[in-house]
Image: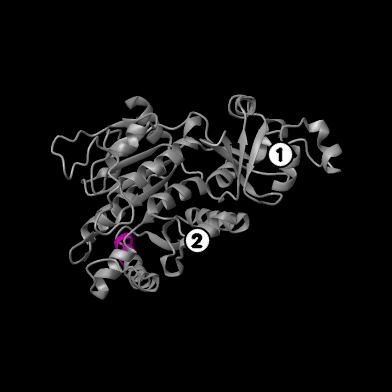
Amino acid sequence: MNSYRKACFDRAKRIVIKVGSNVLTEDNGLNLRAMHAISHQISQLSNRGLEIILVSSGAMASGMKKVGLSRRPEAIPERQAIAAVGQATLIREYEKAFEKDNKKVAQILLTSDGLANRKRHLNARNTINTLLDWQIIPIVNENDTVMVQEIQFGDNDNLAAMITLLMNADILINLTDIDGLYDKDPRCNRDAALISQVSNFSREIEKFASGIPGALGTGGMLSKIKAARKLTTAGVPMVIARGEKPGILLALFAGEAHGTFFVPKEEKLASRKCWIGFNLKPQGALQIDAGAQEAVLRKGKSLLPSGIVAVEGEFGIGAPVEFKRGNRDVLGIGLVNYNSADIRKIMGLRSNRIKSVLGYKPYDEVIHRDNLALTGESVL
């Protein structure tokens, strides 16, 4: 499998690199040595013709140091203010670092509702594509200055995964403060062993992930595992590696097996299906029977009313709705052709009976296969 891992790097043309807070900061503020080292490596990869998108943490941590706080405040306005202070410093230091290699940078601040809106989703993609065409390094972060719970990504691991899917990138490299995923927290257990490769996401994998964030970050190993599951489901590989290891990015592209490599599904999910499956927040759920599961999961079919056994929630036509194995595992998400009230009337029925029950029949399918994305853990 090392040859497969190397092949993924060899054919990668568009790469997302995420750098965590604990790599970018130290006791007295930003870790400029680390920032300059990573920026220089990115510049070298860019000079080879690779397209690099940088997702950078560090704004909150930088702001905390600049304001003189030792811990994150709980109040949202204070956190937003700290992010505003820190973001200016962060992007200025990146400009200085990349200028050494004659590279220009651009700042992109996003919120999750911006990517959930299809028009803004495409606008963000077009903007980043233009920057890449101009050979400018896009530096992406969550717009913490306007952050509220309803519109936040949650952590930059998730944001990096979303950007990877948005830009149809070939791989995500997640640089953190440890060497990868261990079978135990290496900060607490001397006998912890590095897991070099993850081919499937068993329950045991989540147990391995510490879930304990660093002093300055909002994520932890668990958030990285969730990001990796999302990407590999969509057919995109991911690597977790130590960001402060000298020359780590160049070493990965030279074929060296550092960190933990997450093996993707063979088939890459189309861009629009990534948007449906990972950007939209479900407004309800449909429970489906074994026959519908077989048709949707194994045969690539649409979801018909005959396979629906229950409807959860209230939603309108075109809403994003999960479909589940009974009332348990979520298998995926799709855009419905009927509202929740009408689906309750036609569930369990053949499509040729829809018109007699509802008085109209614009579609045979409740969710057409073109508007359906398989995202559940059980479909890997």
Decide: is 235 above or below 143: above
Residue type, label 1: Val
Decide: is 25 above or below 44: below
Direction from residue 18 to residue 304 in the image, left or right: right
Direction from residue 113 to residue 170 in the image, left or right: left
Image spot of residue 237 (x, y percent):
41, 36
Which of 311 and 113 lies nearest the eye of the viewer? Answer: 311
Residue with the mark numbered 2: 150
Is residue 339 in sight in this rendering? no
Image spot of residue 128 (x, y percent):
50, 56
Image spot of residue 356 (x, y percent):
86, 37
Membership of 297 in magenta stretch: no
N-term-proximal mark, 2 vs 1: 2
Direction from residue 93 to residue 299 in the image, left or right: right
Residue with the mark numbered 1: 366
Category of crowding for the residue at label 1, using alpha-carbon neighbours closer than 10 angstroms: few (below 14), some (14–19), many (at least 20): many
Q: Secondary structure at mark 1?
A: loop
At x 57% / y 43%, what residue is drawn? 271
Q: Secondary structure at mark 2?
A: helix
Q: Residue 68 falls in which quadrant of the image?
A: bottom left
Image spot of residue 344 (x, y percent):
71, 42
Q: How is the image coloured?
A: one colour
What segment is highlighted magenta in the picture?
93-99
Q: Residue 368 falls in which quadrant of the image?
A: top right
